[in-house]
Amino acid sequence: MIKNLNELNEYSKKLKIKQNNKTGVNILISMGTCGIAAGARQVLNALSEKIKAENLQDNFHITEVGCMGLCYCEPSIELQDIKTGNSIIYGNLKPEDAEKILNTDFNQSMHGLEVIKRTWNYPEEETENKQNLLQAKIALKNTGRINPERLEDYIVNSGYEALSKALFKMTSRNVIDEITESGLRGRGGGGFPTGKKWSFAAAQKSDVKYIICNADEGDPGAFMDRAILEGDPYSILEAMTIAGYAVKATKGYIYIRAEYPLAIQRLLFAIIQSRNNGFLGKNILDSGFSFDIELRYGAGAFVCGEETALINSIEGLRGTPSNKPPFPAIEGLWDKPTIVNNVETFANINAIIRNGHQWFRKIGTKNSPGTKVFALAGKINNVGLIEVPMGITLKEIIYDIGKGISGGKKLKAVQTGGPSGGCITPDYLNLPIDYDTLKSLGSMMGSGGMIVMDEDDCMVNIAKFFLNFTVDESCGKCIPCRIGGQQMFAILEKITTGKGTEKDLEILTALCDTIKKTSLCGLGMTAPNPVTSTMKYFKHEYEEHVFDKKCRAGKCKDLILFSIEEKKCIGCSACKRVCPADCIEGSLKKPHKINSDKCVKCGECFRACKFGAVIKN
Amino acid sequence: MEIRSRDILMEKNIKINIDGKELIANKGETILSIAKRNDINIPSLCYNKNVSNTAACRLCIVSIEGRPGLHPSCATIAEDGMKITAFSEEIETKRRIILDLILSAHNDDCINCEKDSICELQDLAFKYNLGRDNRNFPPIWNKLKKYSDKSSQVLDYDATKCIQCQRCVKACREKQGKGILTFANRGIETAVSTGYSKWNKSQCDGCGECIQACPVGALVMKPVYNPKNRIRQKDIEKTIITTCPYCGVGCQLKVSTIKNKIVKVEGCNDIPNYGSTCVKGRFGLDFVNHPDRLTKPLIKINGKFEETSWKKALNITAEKLIKIKTKHGNDSICGLSSARCTNEDNYLFQKFMRSIIGTNNVDHCARLCHSSTVAGLAAAFGSGAMTNSISELENADVILVTGSNTTETHPVISTYIKRAVLQNNAKLIVVDPRKIDLVKYAAVWLRQKNGTDVAWINGLMNVIINEKLHNRKFIETRTEGFEEFAATVKKYPPEYVEQITGIPSEDLIKAAKLYGKAENASIVYAMGITQHINGTDNVKSIANLAMITGNIGKESSGVNPLRGQNNVQGACDMGALPNVFPGYQKTDNPEAHFKFAKAWNAELPLKPGLTVVEMMNSILSGNVKAMYIMGENPVISDANSNHVKHSLESLDFLVCQDIFLTETAQLADVVFPSASFAEKDGTFTNTERRILKVNKLISEPGESKPDWQIISELANKMKTNSFSYGSCKNILDEINSLTPQYRGITHSRIASGEKLQWPCPDKKHKGTKFLHKDKFTCGFGKLSAIEHTPPVEKPNKKYPYILSTGRSLYHYHTGSMSRRSTSLNNYLSEAYCEISKEDMNRLNIENGELIKVKSRRGEIELAALLSDKPSTGNIFIPFHFAEAAANKLTNDKLDPVAKIPELKVCAVQIEKI
């Protein structure tokens, strides 16, 4: 139990001395859900056994850390030479690599293992060759570097410095001012200024106020919040406590989706540890301020990421949104002033308090200071979790961090903002990315999904794909979203199956506008985005589907016709053998023929033909 | 929400502009409600003024100058100077698209829909010219087919017509406080659901609030009134507003009829129920058209009834009564008037008994329910009625409910209590030996042992005085008798009270502090307090509690006895009691006696007459020879019914007047067929002293006649031209002239729609919302020192269980009406005995098994029902069922003052059969 500030400082000092006295090599093994799924546990076991067998416990210190963001090469580990500070990252490891890992010579460049080039630095720390590293980790500062289950690790890595500073050197007003000045905007997608939200709640006169951390990360392909919660749970608890101090709230809830068992387990553990050690509960560090946090589990509804739906869900009601105003900061959980911030937003708070708003403003752009975590996915070589300063260009992300399009294909579009976002064309590759530029392009920041598409992707089909998600996740409360989404989907279905008409395009346009302007919550208002943005930048693809009944990417099965060019066919029967529908006829060494009535358009014949005789139109 | 703000004065006015029109509005009002009030018809489907805004249909969108985007006007509070556009091309285009969308997900089978022509969606589709040819979206409602639920006893849910507006869900949750309806699934498959079970297996009790809320044909009533012919709006011939004939709430009903048959009932959006009803009011009026109705006078010849003419029946009765009167004296004849008949009927009945027969032997079933209230409150305050109004409950800080299973006995009043708790953060204290439904809503539940009410009330006051939570100013200026009272209360500290009542002292203290600290605390009680040997003492104790905390004579406070029958208040007001003339004017008060003798031009008896149970006893002792019973069924309703039946059989002459051949009427020598509430005009006075109009809906069956006409004709047979009333209006005129409380409640005011509460001393008076404002009717309030006395029967070895009786939601009193309703019987058709799990195990009986329950007075056989309501050692039996009449068991020992029998406590044994 740490009773007051002095005890905390003493303890922290002690831990630092202990750390400095350590020798040998640190082995950080990425043990987020993704790492574990890729086989990190087996690598870890192999390493531990090896160390034990060879009695190397004094030389190697294994730490299970959260996700390093290197999805494309999991399992991955980082080796740190404690004395020199040198480090090396390996990816795509197998248990049998254990020996090679332990034999690493930091001075050599070849190790017989896949070495991963580091693309990030830590703005809070002075590191050398900073200028070459495009990523800047603030929210992910500890993620992938500390053992998330060890409070000592957190404390020794400047944990609770921000809270002590807030509690003992700042007034509530100071804290809000600092956050306001920093220009931090909500990382959940809306980009609302966090300081402003806090000051609204602070201005409310109420005996009870609440802080809610929105950890109901629901965008398909987005996992930044999970990575933070799994990798650095204490930082969220600390930031929520600071928020509580700022607006005079005494109770916090983390609304987390039940599909994140590891994050839940680590949070629960962190909450108990924090309570036992005096960082949560009554009279924190003898400051007179009391704050506690509980978890609430989401049952898998995407809409519960919307703050009013989330609040209804915590109250035990059906998780559907309510009309705003009143906004939660004025009338939220149980009608009390409530701050709802996303995990990544909270993950920035401690750094801002520790270093001040001026430091924060140096990173990012004027209107969007700081960094943003993106989940980079799709047709890109280095898929993963990245944190980049606002203002970075798409080109830098895709080609420098993501190492370009897989298979050497041509970039067609980048989809940002998850299912409610929009598509951006290669024309805007050099545009600096922040909240406002993405919005001006008809897309949005969203929670940070970034999906790269190449020439094989049909944009109408992509719009339909994303719409399918929002239609499925519509809570059903308001009519534009519930029925409008369904009808919007039906029109796209018509278009992609070659039944679309010119009138459908007109209706679609009007329907998108109605849904956008009349829906009750953000889910409905943004549901048409995938359609409107693709209609804006890829209108010709829609028109091809409607007028020419053609899909240039060859994705819309009903619009493809496979045929065999008689002249090129040598009658090898390769196509006939692979056809699952038995629709290819022809005797050996004579030109074959495809019966298009029976063809299921699987494309097997197209791939099987070595002579280019099978044609796809 | 309108209900909540109804009684709250709105803050100062603001000005807004809608489409160029300058409008004055109240601060806090939504744009939509201002528009609606000013006849600007912004389309909307999910809006329902009785519940909170939903903002789901998005049709009521408007644009507001200076604010980007479109805003739902139902959820946007108007601000001073707002400039609003409600109709523009852009907005109308969007509305049209939204409507087009709704229609694609709605099975627009208008041709086969009973809501045809009263469907809000149909109206809008027509207005926006959205016929099938003009729509842009293909129908997708088929997906919802599988979610339809037609299992309910009284309604059908057609998911393909549902527009998911939430009006039903919110009505169930917010207006009824039940929260049984919810949505299942999400997205396009969202449908109304009763949770994990089908409708008929859910907790839905069939109030029909959801049907009333539905704007389309998704939730409709089953054709309970017309199972063979479906009815559309256009088939309905007449729709008339009248007052519900069931409990004392006095719900205003809109009743539709075709060819003299009730076909549909809806709640009327007016005082006191504002659209709500319970299952009985909405679905249980089919008794009116039941084939069992009496259509001709009957006389008993050789033990068998034969139909006869009115002339013969009246002649025989008149002759017989005159003969007995002459031979045995006026007081050898008794009359029972009826709490189900109108004020006019009751007035004439007691006038008949007093002026034609010449006896004060007139009473009615109020003796069995609230005679102790009348006696107790008259002693304490000078007037024995509910002090405050039903709607005030909603704004109370604390509500103490004791001895009232309000959700079943006064369902609509319970909605006010639930709303107070759920929406206005009131704290509910329930004091009841049974774990009644309201316990779910209670902040504290005190479970006292049956018959220990004085003790816990004294305990509560002991704590209040000790904690100095009593209102000394009120006690000093408004009451008398505090010293003696306080000395008695001092003897009841919580620990002592715990020994008597079984209530843990800490719970008692908690309740005392809640009640004592409240700004406005209301007490609601019913039979659990009154039907005891010390019923009057219980009531006086309750009055003490209200007085020492000053919770009387102001809004949302008071002592509120809930009257059980539709017109039990009126029957008392009209003097259907042995000791008072109309308006509680004492028969032995010379002034009153002179006044009535003069007005009625008759010699009147001075001495108070016999009460119900005394009448029965006097028959056996030979003093009473004949009885005239109007609309009562004492064989089933009175304590110790074997004794009652035996008494009635011993009469020389019994004449009954009823709508059915009840168990009592079967014993009669002559039976007069009377008109039901649906077939006559008149007034009922509900539990909150409000005089409500009863309107004739259909013509009476056969030769049956309104009660007042029968009484008049009999009177005229006995004394020529004594009663000459042309209509109910003439009777009310006479009531106005003789009853001070009713003086201003004239026929013309009632006819014009006024719903006045007595006292209303003159034609300009607006009626009295709550009593005893600055002064009690009797001057100073009387604080009484009252000691606890135990009930007469205690459990012993032979009779180890304590029985209490009461009502079920689905039936009413002796069941003569409710048991002739198809839908009510679909819910409940058999008697049952609630037994706790422990007792079930101890007796080795299964749920549903037939058992025999026996008391010192009788025995009945009925099914055992496993229930968590009674505590171990206690059982409960509803008294509606003649074949297992609970009153064969009950004790007819009387409260010495009010002469009410101890119906709530009797010792019984249970046998496995």
Image (tube, grey):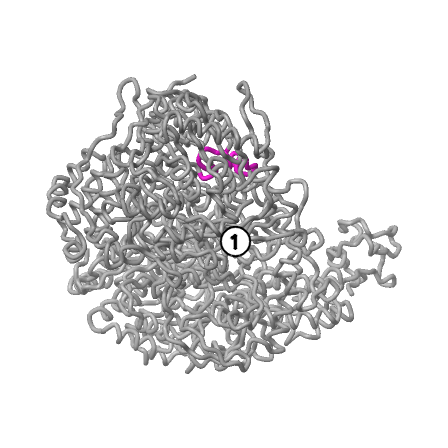
Residue A401, x across and y down, in percent = 49, 71
Whether A123 is among the magenta residues is no
- Residue type at tag 1: Cys
Figure quadrant of the N terminus of chain B = bottom left
Hey, which quadrant is residue B615 in on the image?
Answer: top left
Residue count near mark 1 (Cα–Cα under 10 Å), binned few <14, some 14–19, many ≥20? many
Determine which residue is flagged by label 1: B168
Identified at 44% across, 27% down, the residue is: B323
Q: Which is nearer the eye, B299 or B788?
A: B299
Hey, which quadrant is residue B137 in on the image?
Answer: bottom right
Whether B821 is among the magenta residues is yes
| SS at badge 1 | helix
User: Magenta span covers which residues?
Assistant: B809-828
Q: Is residue B898 visible?
A: yes
Q: Which is nearer the eye, B626 or B275?
A: B626
Figure quadrant of the C terminus of chain B = top left
Q: Chain of mark 1?
A: B
Identified at 33% across, 45% down, the residue is: B561
Q: Is residue A60 visible?
A: no
Residue B191, x across and y down, in percent = 57, 52
Query: Would residue B851 appear left or right of A55 to someone viewing this image?
Result: right
Residue A377, x across and y down, in percent = 54, 64
Identified at 35% across, 78% down, the residue is: A182
Q: Which is nearer the eye, B675 or B827?
A: B675
- Looking at the image, residue A443 lies above or below residue A583: below
Identified at 64% across, 40% down, the residue is: B227
Q: How many marks?
A: 1
Residue B523, x across and y down, in percent = 29, 48
